[in-house]
Structure formats: structure tokens, C-alpha cells
Amino acid sequence: MGRYCFFRFVRSLFKNGTFARLFFGRLITNAGDSAYTIAAMWLAFSLGGSSFYTGLAGFLTMLPQVFQFLAGPLVDRWPLRRILVGTQVTQGILVLVIPLAAATGWLSVWVVLVVMPLVSLLNQFVYPAQQAALPRVVEKEELVEANSAFSFAYQGVDFVFTALGGIVVAVVGAVSLYLIDSVTFAIAALVFVGVQIPPAESDEGDQGEDAKNVTSAVDEYRVQLADGIRYVRGSVLVWVLLGSLVVNATIGTALAVLPAYANTHGGPDAYGFILAGITGGMLVGSLSATPLKRFSLATLSIGGFAFSGVAWLVAIAVGWLPATVALFFLAGVPIGATNVIFAAMVQSVVPEDLMGRVSSVLASGSVGAMPVGSLLGGIGGNVFGNSIVMTSAGFGLLFISACWLTHPLLRNLADVEDLRSERYGLTRSKRAEPSESF
């Protein structure tokens, strides 16, 4: 009955023309985002001839995500449709710099390293603007389903088009993919032009207070961030965050050396297929989270990451591309499943008055590990070799499993209800002092 109600709500949402435009615009723009990230990694490797440049490209492209919260006050001040249309147009122009530079003989790795962070920086306005628009265009009782639909649009499309981006790079080349991206941004801009977003109630106030409002928003963010840090630090979530840091750092290091690693195992075709295997496995894992949630969190983490680590290491050792791709696919399944289940866990146990700030701490902390991992992976690939870095990523997954197995609290976690115990520091109000037991 619950599933039927969900789909009934979703169908009704798409009768809302404004929501439908926002949703399809999100699908299109995220497809372009995912594809050009993959193109940038391969292009940086092929132009720079070194894993260092690939790692640096990943670092610079992913780094702006860490500071997305800084865009919040500006998103609250500016008209949302203007943000959505303007960012798509500007991104489309920026990605055209790459094929233009290639056509004129000016393309170098440094052009890629300058353009891609600028494109990524613009993205930090897009997703907060879309999220801010939802409460203005759908009814309050539809917000859960609207956010679920947007989450699918973000995560599902990211997985699919990251995989397709690798294949397209193998078929038509990275530069051609930038031309395709410019078209997706143009289409997204046209979709967003027709969006009619009502102004927020606060928009009708005194515009002379804008600067004061921005300052207040930043000050409020600082206070809320401190609350979130105290809550996470005083609960079992700090260990979950550390595990997420290791996972994202591991993925970052692997992505940094993957073009060079794949180049020695078949060239751009191997790159596309291996990337499709990893991201496809994560997508299947995320879709398999519902039946897997009946297992305890400890079982999922210990068994899942152990399975991922072993599959990853065997994929590197096997030396036959079809088997390597299949094993990387299997390694990605537990990663995708645990990401979804841990997100649901946080939403289930953290008090509602702390949800925003705790989520921002967890998201910023975990996302921040990826650019650092990418940079270190690129350096490590140059110093120690790409195969060694890829192998270390497999051991990183095994390390997470070992941490859950050896930590006295983590290895006894049964399910979400068990986490409500005071033992795990997850039932306090925001005014309570954090536990010192963690």
C-alpha cells in the first residue's frame, strides 16, 4: 500500500508543469556534469601523460563541492530561475573552450585544469537552487516524494552517465564529449527558461537588508555547523564518517590512476568498460538496498566491504579484461548499497532539529575526502606505479571491514532501532552536551 501511494504521489507531481521542468532539467544537467567529469580525467591523462595530472584534475574538479554551503546565502538572495538558466548557459560556453582550443592547436593539460574547476564551481549554485525551488512549487505533503524523485535524478543519472561517459570517450574521444556536453547544457537552459518559481516570502522584505541577511546567514551557518560537529563527534556517527572518508578517498585514488591503469590494459576502451563496471555495480547496489536492509548494519559493513575488497583485488590480479570488468562491477555493489542504507540510517535516528547540520557535516566530511584522495592517488601513481595504487584501493575497502569488525560498538550494531540507544549518543536534543565516550 505504501509503495502504491508513493507512485500515486509521483504521478501527481508530474502533472505540475513547474516540477516536471525542474526534474527534467535536473536530469539533463546532471547527465552533462557526469560526462564531462569523466572526459576531463581522461583528457588530463592523455595530454599530461602522467597520473599526476589526472589526480590534479580530479582534485580541482571535485574540490568546489566541499564549499557548496557557501553558495547558500547567495541562492537565497538571487532569483532562482536566473541562477538555473545563467549557470547552464555559462557552463555550456566554458565546455566549448576545450574543443575550440583543440581546433586551434592551443589545447593543453593546463587548459583542462583551468576550465574544469570553473565549470564545477558553477555547479555549486545549481543543486541548492533546485532544492530551494521545491518547497515553492509543490505542496507540503508532496515534499518527501519530490525529494525522492530528485534524489533518483541525481544519483541514478550520475551512475548511468558516468558509465556512458567512459564508453563515449572510448568511441568518439574526450574532446567530442565536450561538444555533446555543450548541447546538454543548452537544452537544460531552455528547459529552465520556462520554469515559473514563486518568490519566497522573505523576498518581499526590505532589499536594503540583503547584506545584513547574508551576514546573518553565514553566522547562523557557523553556529549550526558547530552544533552538528558536536553531535557527530559525540556519537557513533563519527566512526561511520571515518568509514565514509576512507571509502571516498579510496574511490578518489582509484579514479586518479584509472586512465593510466586502463591504458596499459587496452586503452580508452578498457577505461570506458572498467568505469562502467564500477559505476554500474554501485547503481545496482543502490537499487538493491531495500532487500538488504533486513541485515544488521554490522553484517552489511563487515561482510560487504570485505567482499568489495576481495573482488577489487582479484579484478586487478586476473589480467583478463572481461573478468576484470565483471569483478569491478561486483566490488561496486556493496558500496552502492551501504551508501543508501547509511543515508537512511542517519535520517531515521538523528533528531529532526539537527538533521540539516548533521547531514552537512557528514556530507562535507565524506565528499572532502574524494579530491584529497584523487590528488594523493595521482602523486602515488607517479611515485609507486598505477597498479600499486589500484591495489591499495582494494586494501582500503578491506580496512573498513576490519575497523567495523574490531571496534566494540560497531561490530555489535544490530539495526536502526538499536541505534536509538543512549549508548550510541544518538538520542540527545541539540542543547545536550556531547558524550565523551567516542
Image (cartoon, helix red, strand yellow):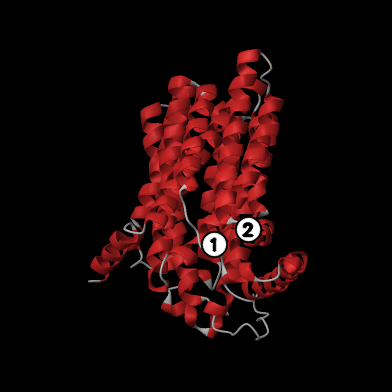
Amino acid type, callout 1: Ala
Give the x, y percent position of residue 413: 46, 73
Q: Residue at x 51, y 41 (%)?
A: 189
Is any atom of residue 231 visible in this view? Answer: yes
Q: CA distance from mark 2 to mark 1?
A: 8 Å
| Element at label 1 | helix
User: Badge 1 local density, few (<14 within 10 Å), some, or many (20+)?
Assistant: some
| Element at label 2 | helix
In this image, 420 relative to 57: left or right?
A: left
Q: Earlier in the sequence, mark 2 or mark 1?
A: 2
- Quadrant location of the N terminus? bottom left
Amino acid type, callout 2: Val
Is any atom of residue 392 visible in this view? Answer: no
314 in relation to 225, above or below:
above
In the depicted view, which residue is nearer to us: 194 or 299?
194
Exactly how many numbered labels are in the figure?
A: 2
Q: Which residue is mark 1?
A: 132
Give the x, y percent position of residue 289: 36, 59
Give the x, y percent position of residue 119: 62, 39
Image quadrant in which you'd find residue 244: bottom right
Q: Which residue is mark 2?
A: 75
In the depicted view, which residue is nearer to us: 35 or 194?
194
Give the x, y percent position of residue 348: 45, 74
